[in-house]
Image (tube, rainbow, N blue to C red):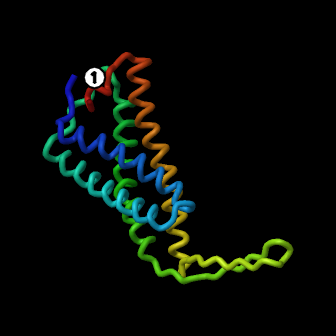
Amino acid sequence: MNKFALPRKIVHWFSAMLFVAVIFVGFNMEDAGSQALTAHLALGLTLLLMTVARLVLGKIYPRPPYPAAIGGFNIRAAKTVQSLMIVLLLLQPLMGLVIYNAPQKAVTETEYKHGGREKIEKQETEYTGEWAETLAEIHAANAWILILLISLHAAGVAKHMIVNRQNLLSRMT
């Protein structure tokens, strides 16, 4: 079976690990504070660089042909899922960068506890424009779409390995 070139394998698996990390940090940012935001941004930008590297390496080291036994429908499905993943992996970090740099304002929220005897003021920030909030919602939705696409990608490989007894994973290992 034809295999991917080693540089493409390295970028593929490093990107997979980065994706897991950026999603984990992203979903836990609310509770973790500004260091988590910085980590999420750094991981996202690194994932963007890996996605660009994947595109460049694709020109240098072409994709090996799919095994004929896979069939035309499965090949089209795989290419569609992979293309959508690449587009979102390029857009997602760029959206995050725009959101990160969106203008914000400080907001003081007052909360009373113990029957009004204790006053607690919390400092938070919020975006000054509705567009940034909308973009943040799109960014969150795209994370779920990427999780779905990557799950479809992995499920396709697993299906071919388990049901069809075609070791597609060996192309990328």
User: Foreground residue, 74 or 18?
Assistant: 18
User: Foreground residue, 81 or 171?
Assistant: 171
* Whether residue 4 is situated above or below residue 52 in the rendered picture: above
Location of residue 137 (image quadrant):
bottom right
Q: Position of residue 80 (x, y in %)?
A: 38, 42
Amino acid on which disc 1 is placed: Ala
Q: Position of residue 165 (x, y in %)?
A: 37, 16
**Quadrant in which the C terminus is drawn:** top left
Q: Which residue is mark 1?
A: 68
User: Taking 151 as reference, is 123 left or right?
Assistant: right
User: Foreground residue, 109 or 5?
Assistant: 109
In this view, the residue farthest toward the left is: 60
* Whether residue 10 is situated above or below residue 56 in the rendered picture: above
- For image coordinates 56% across by 77% down, the residue present is 125
User: Taking 104 as reference, is 41 left or right?
Assistant: left
Secondary structure of residue under mark 1: helix
- For image coordinates 57% across by 60% down, the residue present is 31
Location of residue 108 (image quadrant):
bottom right
- For image coordinates 40% across by 17% down, the residue present is 164
Callout 1 crowding tier (Cα within 10 Å): few <14, some 14–19, many ≥20: few
User: Foreground residue, 107 or 90?
Assistant: 107
* Whether residue 36 is situated above or below residue 119 in the rendered picture: above
In this view, the residue farthest toward the right is: 115
Location of residue 167 (image quadrant):
top left
Q: Position of residue 5 (x, y in %)?
A: 17, 36
